Amino acid sequence: MTNFSRITLGAASLAVLGACEAPREAVSRAAPADAMRVLGYKGIETRLLDGDLVQFVVTMDGEAMPDDVRRYTECAAAQYSLIRGYGFARHLRTNVEIKGGQWRGDAVYTISAALPRGLKTIDAEVIVHNCIEDKIPMV
């Protein structure tokens, strides 16, 4: 077999394989099942602890889960940062508990004008935009 015939056979094999591409699945734009949950946003308490250290206490009910409570505190921290003239926040801790069917989140953030050091930082403008789109109330 000559080099030319090997190249021709190789090209033909690739063409056949390309024609055997698996059919693509349709992409659904329907809302995921989680989007149908009813979340009750019951309020935000903001406490300035010291200079740039802020505590957020939120309450939720309905079909909320711990991640919903954490997201609610993040939205509150982002909006508060913008209200105070800062563009960033850094998450320090969040405690989440449920009592009597009501969720409570207790979070502490530092707020700052410049991007703070650390792994759990948020860009306040981006988070606020996302919270507005997701209809999560803020401060």
Image (spheres, rainbow, N blue to C red):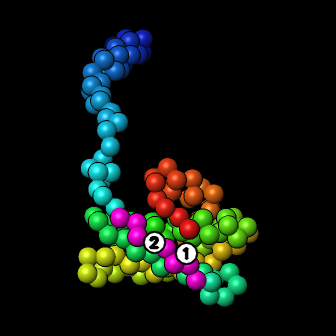
Residue sitting at 62 percent across and 83 percent down? 48
Q: Which numbered circle lies on residue 91?
A: 1
Residue sitting at 27 percent across and 25 percent down? 23
Residue sitting at 59 percent across and 66 percent down? 78
* Residue 115 shown left or right of residue 138 in the figure: right
Dividing the picture into quadrants, the one containing residue 30 is top left
Q: Which residues are magenta?
A: 40-47
Q: Quadrant of the N terminus?
A: top left
Q: Quadrant of the C terminus?
A: bottom right
Report if residue 91 is visible in the image. Answer: yes
Q: Which residue is mark 2?
A: 43
Q: Secondary structure at mark 2?
A: strand
Q: Amino acid at mark 2?
A: Gly
Task: Indicate the position of residue 114 as horizontal and vertical percent values.
Answer: 73, 68
Report if residue 6 is visible in the image. Answer: no
Task: Indicate the position of residue 86 as horizontal and vertical percent values.
Answer: 71, 68
**Vertical comparison of 50 with 60: above or below:** below
Q: Earlier in the sequence, mark 1 or mark 2?
A: 2
Q: Is residue 100 magenta?
A: no
Residue sitting at 31 percent across and 17 percent down? 19
Task: Indicate the position of residue 96 as horizontal and vertical percent values.
Answer: 38, 79
Q: Amino acid at mark 1?
A: His
Crowding at dot 1, Cα within 10 Å, few <14 / some 14-19 / many 20+, comes out as some
Q: Marks 1 and 2: which is nearer the front?
A: 2
